[in-house]
Image (cartoon, rainbow, N blue to C red):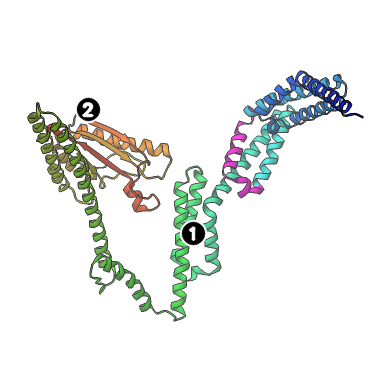
Amino acid sequence: MSDFLRRVTTTLVFIGLSGAVYAQQELRSTFFKEADAARAAAEAANASLLAPRSWSRGVREYEQAEQALNRGRSIESVRSNAADAAGYFNTAAEAATLATTALAQVLKSRQDAANALAPKLAPDIWERAQRSFGDAIRLLERGDLKGAQREDIEATTLYRDAELVAIKSQYLSETRRLLSDADRARVGRYAPITLAKAKELLANAEKELNENRYDTDLPRNLAKQANYEAKHAIYLSEIARKIRDKSLTPEQLVLSWEASLRSISDAADILPNMVDGPDRLAGELVSHIESQQDAIQRLEQEQGENAIRIADMEDELRALDERLGGATAERAALVQRLEAQARVKEQFERVEKMFSDSEARVFRQGNTVILRLVGLNFASGDSKIRPESFDLLAKVEKAIDVFPRSELIIEGHTDAYGGDDFNQQLSQDRAESVKQYMINAMRIQDFRLIATGYGETRPLASNETESGRTKNRRIDIVIKPNLEATS
């Protein structure tokens, strides 16, 4: 065959194939349009999960229609299979929509369990829940609503059980392992008090999760404390064994602990006097650290104030130098404002001397003065001011009087324990309680006062320790002086 004939033959074959492909595409767009739309609607309704019987029949008919089209079978066969597929998909979409409403509770509990990693952390309960859930789906799809409701209740219970087991596994498994190791090592024989404390903390953490599985801040912290106490118990038991075996004497043990305190004392330049034990030295070290923290805070305040003052002076003096007219009056205004700022600083120092460290911490941010009322305490979960706080609030009134016509912002803050919404409302209620006290007892005009609750969103310290949480539970009084009224 000549090259010319081969090219002609190849061209004719290509044209024939192209025509066949085009014709097949046209047939598909004609006969599968309704089936494709129905399938998309069923997929959107999650029918493969919520109506598996109708969905699988629709998929089978759809695939048979595709095979008939691809193999060139009769158009009527393709049309019939595609129409049946569309019907099943429509039925599946309707059943899935019904299931979404009728099985809303179990669907939510299933998602919650999945979010808690229950398939991995509680596989046995998860599988039982899955089987019960599948039974509920099948019964509902067959029209047995009562049967579906029975399985719905069973599956919901199992999913919630799986979720709780998974949450406990996430937060408590390490603690349980440590306590198991401690029991095998007979730690309770040598450190029974510390080990019992670890077990009590674990029990409290589990109790908190049982009562409120979605507020994990407290149980997580309790579990961490339990881990610490379990490890500490193991350490103490090793020390006790060494003393029992006489490889370590009590005197050597005490001296090793004192050596650590001596190192800290050397760094603080404090004479480590431990003639009567470590208590006096520990108190001196705590006082030293607190005084250093106060000194750092004062230096930071002064640095910030000086930077602001210098920047303001440079900007205004530069602007004044560029203008000749009215310079004298504007310079006088600048001097007047600087004098007002100096008076604010002097007033701040007066206020600072009014409070002891156990009552309030006083510090500045620019011209703003902040009273951190560490001595103002509320009962747990309550916003009522207790009588023992009245003396402190009387001092607050005197401090406010130092700054006439100042704007006052009462800020409420909580630690991270408890739900976010509850803490937000509690902090707002406590701030409002202080505001009302100022209006009623201090006779401060309402327009000068703003009460704001920040909940747990502005911590000062870690919520993982009791001392940190104590610092975070606070009322701050923010005083914004009126510079024109500071003279």
**Circles 1, 2 touching at the beta carbon (< 8 Å):** no
Above or below: residue 450 compared with residue 238: above
The residue positioned farthest toward the right in the image shown: 1
Q: Which residue position is annotated with label 1?
A: 199
Which label belongs to residue 447? 2
Q: Amino acid at mark 2?
A: Phe
Residue 462 x/y as whole percent? 37, 50
The magenta segment: 102-124
Going by the picture, which residue comes out furthest to the bottom?
A: 246
Task: Identify the secondary structure beneath mark 1.
Answer: helix
| Residue 361 seen in render | no
Amino acid type at image mark 1: Lys
| SS of the residue under disc 2 | helix
* Residue 264 quadrant: bottom left
What crowding class fits label 1: few (fewer than 14 Cα within 10 Å), some (14-19), or many (20 or more)? some
Q: Which mark is residue 407?
A: none
Residue at 17% x, 35% y is 481
Image quadrant in which the N terminus is located:
top right
| Residue 243, horizontal then vertical, whole percent | 43, 78
